[in-house]
Image: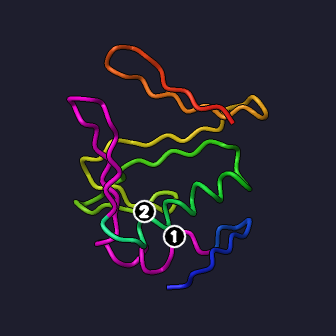
Amino acid sequence: MSQSVILDEEASDIPSDEVLNNDSHNLSVEVDSNNKDVHLKFSSKEAMRDFAKSILHESYYGSGEIEFYPLISDGKAHVVDGVRLTENSKSVLVKQHKTPLLWTVQTQLENNHRLMYEA
């Protein structure tokens, strides 16, 4: 496994051949019903790396919005935007905040408070 990450506009290595050709590399997204925490459970470092590369690629070359969702056909999970989500996974939406110099992450908590991060 290479320690270097190279991104090109065509995303020629997303997903990696290993993730694309080996169904054991996947992501399961679960929401804890008690505290509403979101758990990203990667089956391998390769699955985690391709997820990160997809988001990084979107930040450089895309519109700033990407959605990861389970795509199941004939009982088999397929790769979407570099990531294979398991059948019962929740979808993940990643969106760039449109205000320059303000990056906001908002998490709706049980008591309707919002957690915001500004940079």
Left or right, 79 with reference to 28: right
Return the residue found at the far bottom: 1
Q: Quadrant of the C terminus?
A: top right
- Out of 37 and 75, give the one closest to the viewer: 37
SS for dot 1: loop
Quarter of the image for residue 104 reads top right
- Out of 105 and 18, give the one closest to the viewer: 105
Left or right, 23 with reference to 56: left
Residue 68 placed where, x, y %? 46, 49
Q: Are marks 1 and 2 in contact (CB under 8 Å)?
A: yes
Quarter of the image for residue 31 reads top left
Is residue 16 in the magenta section?
A: yes
Between discs 1 and 2, the one toward the N terminus:
1
Decide: few, some or many residues near mark 2? Use Cα within 10 Å; few <14, some 14-19, many ≥20.
many
What is the span of residues highlighted in magenta in the rendered image? 13-42
Amino acid type at mark 1: Pro
Amino acid type at mark 2: Val
- Out of 15 and 108, give the one closest to the viewer: 108
Residue 92 placed where, x, y %? 44, 43
User: Which residue in the protein does label 2 denote?
Assistant: 79
User: Which residue in the protein does label 1 denote?
Assistant: 15
Image height check: is 53 above or below 90? below
